[in-house]
């Protein structure tokens, strides 16, 4: 019987709490414990379990790979926070702020190595297959992060490039997590490919939805800084599409607001940037884009050759993720 996402979250949280890191060199491992202890929905490791659960009820075999994905994800967060000069992660101090940058770099490195150790437990043939996908995914995530950095100093970013960036930086790990679980559970090559495509396209839709909420949800609803993407001048789909939709004068004005020459900051910047985006109805276009990727994702899930009831947890998960208001 297929377990719900909430049941899988409980299974994974319990498994994670049982992990014991070495007690030697606490300055190396304490930051790992700290970051993992900040919580979160554990979406990626839970998707590993969900992928496996589609093919059987023996989930213990997938827990190691779920740990590998969770450790890799948090390793990337630890290093991303350094690059972004971020002060907070889930409302708490980032590792490099609580400790220091050198500690965060080294603790992140050991998390990556631990991720590889989790994969080493699998039988040789499966281990090779898992490592291959894991390494391909890791490279794509690094490429996505570099694109995101490059966009900060470019004024010619295209929508196609933006979709590629969020696909690599965010979406491929969701797809890989499901694929890993399916592979461990015994999915056919075709099913594993469809699971990957489902997760990847849900990931793209999720990021577009996140972009919409950042600009158009209120602070109270979203729990985030209102208009954070505008304040940080992130070249999201909303910004890039608005440049296309606005008249020449307004398009130039929006581009100026995002430029280094602009001295408008804070609430004034958010207010004017949002007003320009509202004037061209870009939210409607963004919602349509999100729905297109959502439909593509569900078409791949439909092609997975398991009983429909086994797909329900993933359908429910995706709908909840993409219909949220915060």
Image: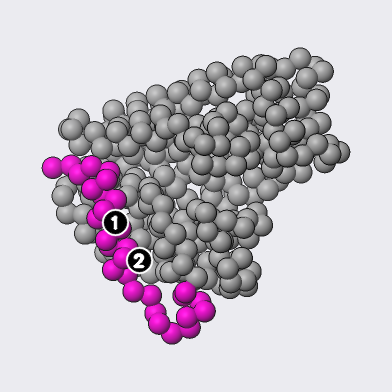
Q: Position of residue 325 (x, y in %)?
A: 45, 31
Q: Quadrant of residue 201?
A: top left
> 85 or 49: which is nearer to us?
85
Query: Which residue shows up at 67% across the image and 16% down it?
Result: 279
Q: Residue furthest front?
A: 220
Residue 183 in view here: no
Query: Which residue shows up at 30% across the image and 58% down it?
Result: 13
- Does 71 appear above or below 99? above
Q: Residue furthest bottom?
A: 24
Q: Label 2, on which residue?
A: 118
Q: Label 1, on which residue?
A: 12
Q: Quadrant of residue 234?
A: top right
Q: Position of residue 243 (x, y in %)?
A: 72, 23
Under tag 1, what secondary structure? Answer: helix
Classify residue 169 as left or right of residue 53: right
Region rendered in magenta: 1-30
Of tags 2 and 1, the one toward the viewer is 1
Q: Residue furthest right?
A: 261
Query: Which residue shows up at 16% across the image and 47% down it?
Result: 56
Question: Is residue 19 highlighted in magenta?
Answer: yes
Question: Is residue 113 highlighted in magenta?
Answer: no
Q: Quadrant of residue 38?
A: bottom left
Q: Residue furthest left?
A: 1
Residue 11 in view here: yes
């Amino acid at each position: 019987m297929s377990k719900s996402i909430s049941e899988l979250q409980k299974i994974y949280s319990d498994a994670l709490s049982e992990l014991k890191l070495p007690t030697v060199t606490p300055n190396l491992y304490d930051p790992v414990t700290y970051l993992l202890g900040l919580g979160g929905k554990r979406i990626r490791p839970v998707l590993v379990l969900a992928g496996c659960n589609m093919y059987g009820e023996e989930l213990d075999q997938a827990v190691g790979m779920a740990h590998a994905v969770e450790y890799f994800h948090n390793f990337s967060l630890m290093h991303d926070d350094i690059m972004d000069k971020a002060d907070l992660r889930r409302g708490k101090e980032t590792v490099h702020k609580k400790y220091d940058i050198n500690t965060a770099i080294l603790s992140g490195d050991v998390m990556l190595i631990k991720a590889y150790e989790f994969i080493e437990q699998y039988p040789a043939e499966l281990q090779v297959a898992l490592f291959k996908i894991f390494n391909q995914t890791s490279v794509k995530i690094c490429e996505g992060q570099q694109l995101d950095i490059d966009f900060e100093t470019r004024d010619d970013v295209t929508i196609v490039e933006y979709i590629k960036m969020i696909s690599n930086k965010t979406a491929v790990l969701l797809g890989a997590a499901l694929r890993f679980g399916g592979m461990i559970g015994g999915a056919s090559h075709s099913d594993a490919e469809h699971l990957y495509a489902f997760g990847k396209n849900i990931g793209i839709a999720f990021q577009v939805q996140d972009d919409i909420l950042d600009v158009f949800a209120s602070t109270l609803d979203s729990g985030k800084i209102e208009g954070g993407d505008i304040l940080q001048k992130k070249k999201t789909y909303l910004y890039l599409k608005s440049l296309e939709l606005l008249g020449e004068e307004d398009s130039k004005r929006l581009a100026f607001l995002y430029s280094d020459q602009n001295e408008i900051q804070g609430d004034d910047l958010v207010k004017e940037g949002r007003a320009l985006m509202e004037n061209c109805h870009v939210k409607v276009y963004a919602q349509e884009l999100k729905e297109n990727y959502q439909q593509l994702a569900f078409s791949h899930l439909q092609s997975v050759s398991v009983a429909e009831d086994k797909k329900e947890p993933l359908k429910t998960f995706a709908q909840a993720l993409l219909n949220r208001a915060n």
